[in-house]
Every structure is written in structure tokens, then in C-alpha cells.
Image: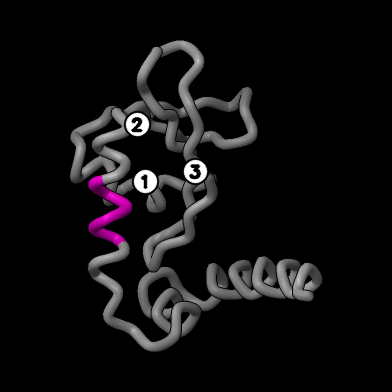
Amino acid sequence: MWIFTETGFVSAVRNTENEGKYSVRARDRESLAGLIGTTGAELIVTSHTDYPYRIIITPDEFVQWTSEQASSIDYPNFKSQVAKTRGYEYTGALHDVWLAMLKTQT
């Protein structure tokens, strides 16, 4: 699952080495900062995977965090909010994602 929040982008999958846990991965540390603050999970840094930063958490911790993210939406425009929290360069990358997904519109 890919999730974009006002603080970053994460990818969550089942962890194949820790039964019953999720790996939540990111391309930058900042995207995981909120989850680490909430869960106390240890940041794992690796150079041999496509996502260099990751944490291992329980499904319940992930559900709680995603629920908090959804409940805290107080902005009328996502990309404008991200420009405030992550800057214009990051927002440019979001626009590229938006444009790529526009191609799937029916």
C-alpha cells in the first residue's frame, strides 16, 4: 500500500521475516518520522533495497497511524499543504505522481 501524507510518502507491506508485522518503507527519513514518534520503532537504514529507510511495526500500530492521518486532515488542497510541510521540490514530485495517475482516468 502506498500512502501519501502531508509529511511524506510510505509504502507498507507484510514483513516476510517477522510474522504478523509490517515493513513500512520510505525513500527519505522524514517520511517515517511521525510513525517512529508514535510507535518508537527503530529506523533501519539499508543500501541494498529500493527503499533505503524502513521500520517494522504491528498492523495495529499502522492502522492507528493511518487513522490519525485521516482524522487530522484540515486543509482544502493536499499539494498546497505539502508545499508548506515539505517544500516545493517535494510538491513537484507529488505533481508528477498526480500527472501519472491522470493517465489512468476513464
In the image, residue 28 sits, relative to residue 73, either above or below, namely above
Q: Which residue is mark 1?
A: 32
Q: Name the mark on residue 26.
A: 3
Measured as percent of width and height from the top left, residue 10 is found at 47, 48
Q: Name the mark on residue 43.
A: 2
Question: 3 or 82, which lies in front?
Answer: 3
Amino acid type indicated by mark 3: Ala
In the image, residue 62 sits, relative to residue 94, either above or below, namely above
The residue lying at 24 percent from left, 69 percent from top is: 72
Task: State which tag comes first along the sequence, 2 or 3.
Answer: 3
**What distance separates the C-alpha of mark 2 from that of mark 3?**
11 Å
Q: Is residue 68 magenta?
A: yes
The residue lying at 38 percent from left, 88 percent from top is: 76
Q: Along the horizontal axis of the image, is 21 left or right of 68?
A: right
Amino acid type indicated by mark 2: Leu
Task: State which tag comes first along the sequence, 1 or 2.
Answer: 1
Amino acid type indicated by mark 1: Leu
The residue lying at 53 percent from left, 50 percent from top is: 2
- Give the crowd class for mark 2: few <14, some 14-19, many >=20 residues within 10 Å: some
